[in-house]
Image (cartoon, rainbow, N blue to C red):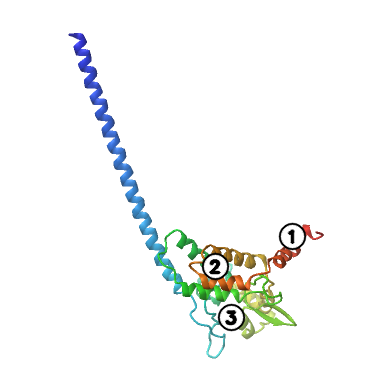
Amino acid sequence: TWGYYIQLQSFRGSKMKLGLMLVIFIIICCGVYQSSAINLQGNQKAESQTEILYKQVQSQQMKRSRKASLIPFQFELKKGLYKSFVKMNLIDPQNSDITTFLRRSFSVVDSNMFVTNFVLHAIVESMELGAISKVDVESFDSAVQAILSFQDKNSNQGVPIYNFWEQAKEKGFWSASPQNLNMLVNIFPTLPKQLAPLMHKFGLDIFMVVKKIAKAFRIPCDVDDSSVNLSLGRLLHLHKDKFPKSYKRWTRQNTDYVTYFNAIKKYAYLSLIHI
């Protein structure tokens, strides 16, 4: 009798354990399903948000070119580039509302290749992740064409050396020339030194040295701008089936890599100057 009772209890215990394991298994499955559903919804929302951001970014692409002018007052635009802005860090000792307003409100439309290059990188990477369903190829080609116009005019044709801004010739040499910033600097008067304390009080010290700052705009080509162009070329090579026009144009204009890397050795790595 005792043996039968022990076997019965053991059987009942086994059934309870089995039932408990089954319940735990069901709970785990429900949790995994719920987690997958949440992740799926999250991914769908993320993709939807990326599409929205892509449309917003596309609305900031310059659709046509125009010259900078005072009358009528307008900033230079270059077709294909994405808008970026130069802002001045105006701040007075008290961080007053006046300088806060000027700092937030005043900006100058800029035309540089650096920002547009990174926008294209972001678009391609979003496309690779499936976050953008369709890329505007015509818009993309227009941006690549604009970037290629920043190639250094002092170098031989085909050398992939680039400048942040487009270049203008001065004293027989091509150097960066941001037209919108130059226009504002040229019309700004040279202020008398007696105004310096007043300008400092309102956080406007920068306007005392505007003419001197303009010289800093004439920057040479650098590794940053040139290397992001090479990175763009790599992306175009990986996706030449999607952007055949941009790929052909880019490879046709960037050919002399030996000269490019020799320039890096010469100017960037001074420790190798005797090699």
The quadrant of the picture occupied by the C terminus is bottom right
Please tell me whether residue 215 is drawn above or below residue 226 in the rendered image. Answer: below
In percent of width and height, residue 144 lies at 55, 73
Residue at far bottom of view: 71
Within 10 angstroms of label 3, few (less than 14), some, or many (20 or more) residues?
Answer: many
Using the rendered image of the protein, determine whether residue 257 is visible from the camera's viewpoint. yes
Q: Residue furthest right?
A: 274
Q: Secondary structure at mark 2?
A: loop
Numbered label attached to residue 88 = none
| Of the pair 114 and 194, the residue shown nearer to us | 114
C-beta proximity under 8 Å, tags 3 and 2: no
Residue 7 in the image: state x and y as whole percent. 22, 15
For numbered disc 3, what is the local secondary structure?
helix
Residue 95 disc label = 2
Q: Are marks 3 and 1 in contact (CB under 8 Å)?
A: no
**Residue hosting label 3:** 180
Q: Dot 1 corresponds to which residue?
A: 269
**Marks 3/1: CA distance?**
33 Å
